[in-house]
């Protein structure tokens, strides 16, 4: 049986707190609890690479990118508990440069604070790897930092445009290059990188909108993704990535839930959730966000700078 460890975060009913250090401090206990349960997977690591879901500089309160405070809490645990170098990784693509995303989400501040390398994998040396997925051998171009480190995948709890869970495997897939079908790439990339574990950011999730889930969980990539898929009301067999990485012999997935988080209630809030349709942001939304940013001190996201 695969199991994931679940912990409640310090939810704040007074609303979003823009200060990164404050939010990081509030999350360190919960994130530390799920990492303590997986300590053996990181034993002896010389370098740990955190791979957040930082695909675009959306505001972290939306729930569609990994909250930098979760990344900071992971970094704080690694810095305190392990004698290992630390890196935070992402990859520039044709939409956005990673350094802009990292700056907006303040991953660069975290890297400075914990003396971590901030690595744009688009510029890193790469190796060609081949892994089986969907009954075929899939060719991948994999950045060396992902192969030479113990990787902690840190996705946020959100669906993809197609309704599947974004998850850890699909987060890793965006960091490699391949001409294969996306589902095969996600399976092959996970097998090539062999991540030590996944830490899922469920502080703010995204269903049909942001949801204050106030939870983090950890475990193997397939187990975490299977639980995340279930929270969106999807069976493992309905998700080709989850079903390929978590074969029948490894099921069912158990959840260690010492804080007694109501997973049924969370599933009810997230089930069937979809990302909003693509297209231009309505001007009312842009204007409202600018007003919020002026009052709170937060920056206006690049996607609203129009």
Image: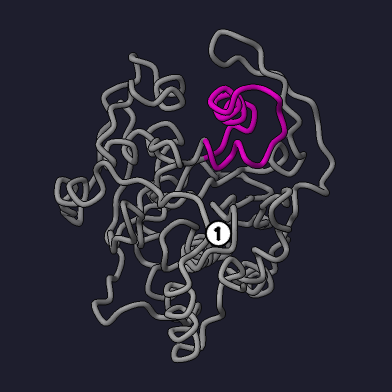
The residue positioned 74% from the left and 44% from the top of the image is: 145
- In what element is the residue under mark 1? helix
Which residue occupies the foreground of this view, 259 or 221?
221
Q: Is residue 229 above or below residue 92?
A: above
Left or right: 292 with respect to 190?
left
**Residue at 37% in and 74% down:** 26
Quadrant in the picture for the C terminus: bottom right
Q: How far across and how far down the image is residue 41, in percent? A: 50, 40
Q: Residue furthest bottom?
A: 295
**Residue drawn at point x = 43 percent, y = 84 percent:** 292
**Start and end of the magenta stretch?**
170-196
What's the residue at 29%, 32% (across, down)? 234
Reply yes or no: does residue 229 show up in magenta: no
Whole-percent x and y of residue 271?
24, 43
| Residue labelled with disc 1 | 78
* Position above or below: 119 against 100: above
Q: Considering depth in this image, is 17 or 114 the residue closer to the camera?
A: 17
Colouring scheme applied when the structure was drawn: one colour
Q: Can residue 175 be found in the magenta stretch?
A: yes
Q: Is residue 86 above or below residue 198?
A: below
Q: Is residue 230 left or right of residue 69?
A: left
Could you tell me residue 236's position as x and y percent? 32, 26
């Amino acid at each position: 049986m695969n199991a994931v460890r679940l912990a409640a975060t310090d939810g704040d009913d007074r609303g979003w707190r823009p200060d990164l250090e404050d939010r990081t401090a509030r999350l360190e206990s919960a994130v530390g609890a799920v990492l303590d349960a997986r300590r053996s997977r990181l034993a002896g690591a010389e370098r740990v690479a955190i791979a957040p879901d930082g695909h675009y500089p959306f505001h972290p309160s939306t729930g569609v990118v990994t909250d930098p405070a979760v990344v900071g809490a992971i970094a704080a645990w690694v810095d305190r508990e392990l004698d290992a170098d630390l890196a935070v990784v992402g990859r520039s693509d044709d939409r956005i440069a990673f350094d802009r995303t990292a700056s907006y989400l303040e991953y660069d501040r975290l890297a400075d604070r914990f003396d971590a390398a901030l690595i744009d994998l688009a510029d890193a040396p790469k190796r060609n790897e081949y892994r089986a997925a969907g009954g075929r051998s899939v060719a991948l171009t994999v950045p060396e930092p992902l192969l030479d480190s113990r990787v902690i995948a840190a996705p946020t709890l959100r669906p993809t445009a197609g309704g599947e869970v974004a998850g850890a495997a699909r987060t890793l897939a965006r960091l490699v290059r391949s001409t294969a079908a996306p589902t095969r790439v996600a399976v092959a990339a996970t097998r090539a990188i062999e991540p030590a574990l996944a830490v899922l950011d469920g502080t703010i999730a995204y269903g049909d909108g942001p949801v204050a889930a106030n939870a983090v969980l950890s475990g193997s990539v397939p187990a975490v993704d299977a639980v995340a898929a279930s929270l969106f009301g999807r069976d493992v067999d309905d998700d080709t990535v989850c079903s390929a990485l978590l074969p029948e012999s490894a099921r069912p997935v158990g959840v260690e839930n010492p804080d007694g988080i109501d997973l049924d209630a969370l599933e009810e809030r997230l089930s069937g959730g979809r990302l909003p349709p693509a297209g231009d942001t309505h001007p009312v939304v842009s204007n409202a966000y600018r007003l919020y940013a002026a009052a709170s001190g937060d920056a206006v996201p690049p996607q609203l700078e129009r």
